[in-house]
C-alpha cells in the first residue's frame, strides 16, 4: 500500500514526464562541417587508427572532427556548450586533448583548404591547447625550494 507521500511523488513524476514528452522536439540536424572531398583529404592524411578508443556512431572520427571544428569556430565557447548531436562534450574534449598530445591535428589542418577560416580557427584552438598543456607541465615540474 502506498503512503500519501509516495502517491504524491508518483503523481509529480508522471506529470513531469508528460510535460517533457509534450514539449520535447527532435534535435535539429547540424549542418555538416566537412564536405566529402575535404573528409577524403583528411582521412588519407590521418592514416590508421582513427577511432581506436571510440565506440558508437556519435564517436565516429568524422563526427568527432566536425565537433572540434564547431568548437574552433564558435568564438571561444566552452566545451560544455558543444551541441549534444556531436556526442558527450567531455568525451570530445578528452579525445581532442589526446590528439593534441599525439600531434594528430596537423594532418587535419593540412586537409582543409588554405583559404578556409576553419583552418585558421582549428590551428588557433590546437595551439592554445598545446600552450596550456605546456604551462601545466612546466608548473608540475617546478619544485618550490
Image (spheres, rainbow, N blue to C red):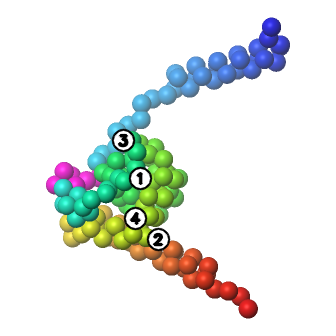
User: Percent from the top left, x then y, of residue 134?
Assistant: 51, 79
Give the residue at mark 2.
129
Gap between marks 4 and 2 measured at Cα: 11 Å
SS of the residue at dot 3? helix
Contact between labelled residues 1 and 3, with CB atoms less than 8 Å apart:
no
Gap between marks 4 and 3 measured at Cα: 19 Å
Contact between labelled residues 2 and 4, with CB atoms less than 8 Å apart:
no
Gap between marks 3 and 2 measured at Cα: 26 Å
Instruction: Please tell me which of labels 4 and 3 falls first in the chain.
Output: 3
Instruction: Please tell me which of labels 1 and 4 falls first in the chain.
Output: 1
Comparing labels 1 and 4, the label whose residue is closer to the camera: 1
Instruction: Say if residue 29 shows up in the picture.
Output: yes
SS of the residue at dot 4? helix
Contact between labelled residues 1 and 2, with CB atoms less than 8 Å apart:
no
Farthest residue to the top: give it: 1
User: Percent from the top left, x then y, of residue 70?
Assistant: 38, 55
Range covered by the magenta-colored residues: 33-39
The answer to whether residue 134 is above or below residue 129 is below
Comparing labels 4 and 2, the label whose residue is closer to the camera: 4
Gap between marks 1 and 4 measured at Cα: 12 Å
Q: Quadrant of the N terminus?
A: top right
For image coordinates 46% across by 71% down, the residue present is 129
The answer to whether residue 59 is above or below residue 49 is above
Gap between marks 3 and 1 measured at Cα: 13 Å
Q: Residue 35: within the magenta? A: yes
Give the residue at mark 1.
53
- Give the label on residue 99, or none: 4
Instruction: Say if residue 42 shows up in the picture.
Output: no
Contact between labelled residues 4 and 1, with CB atoms less than 8 Å apart:
no
Give the residue at mark 3.
57
Amino acid at each position: 500500500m502506498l503512503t500519501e507521500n509516495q502517491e504524491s511523488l508518483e503523481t509529480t513524476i508522471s506529470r513531469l514526464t508528460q510535460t517533457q514528452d509534450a514539449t520535447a522536439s527532435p534535435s535539429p540536424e547540424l549542418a555538416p562541417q566537412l564536405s566529402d572531398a575535404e573528409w577524403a583529404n583528411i582521412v588519407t592524411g590521418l592514416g590508421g587508427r582513427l577511432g581506436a578508443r571510440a565506440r558508437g556512431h556519435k564517436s565516429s572520427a568524422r563526427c568527432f572532427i566536425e565537433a572540434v571544428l564547431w568548437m574552433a569556430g564558435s568564438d571561444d565557447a566552452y566545451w560544455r556548450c558543444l551541441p549534444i548531436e556531436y556526442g558527450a562534450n567531455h568525451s570530445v574534449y578528452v579525445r581532442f586533448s589526446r590528439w593534441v598530445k599525439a600531434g594528430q591535428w596537423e594532418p587535419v589542418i593540412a586537409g582543409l583548404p588554405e583559404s578556409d577560416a576553419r583552418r585558421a580557427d582549428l590551428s588557433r584552438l590546437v595551439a592554445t591547447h598545446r600552450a596550456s598543456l605546456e604551462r601545466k607541465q612546466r608548473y608540475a615540474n617546478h619544485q618550490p625550494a
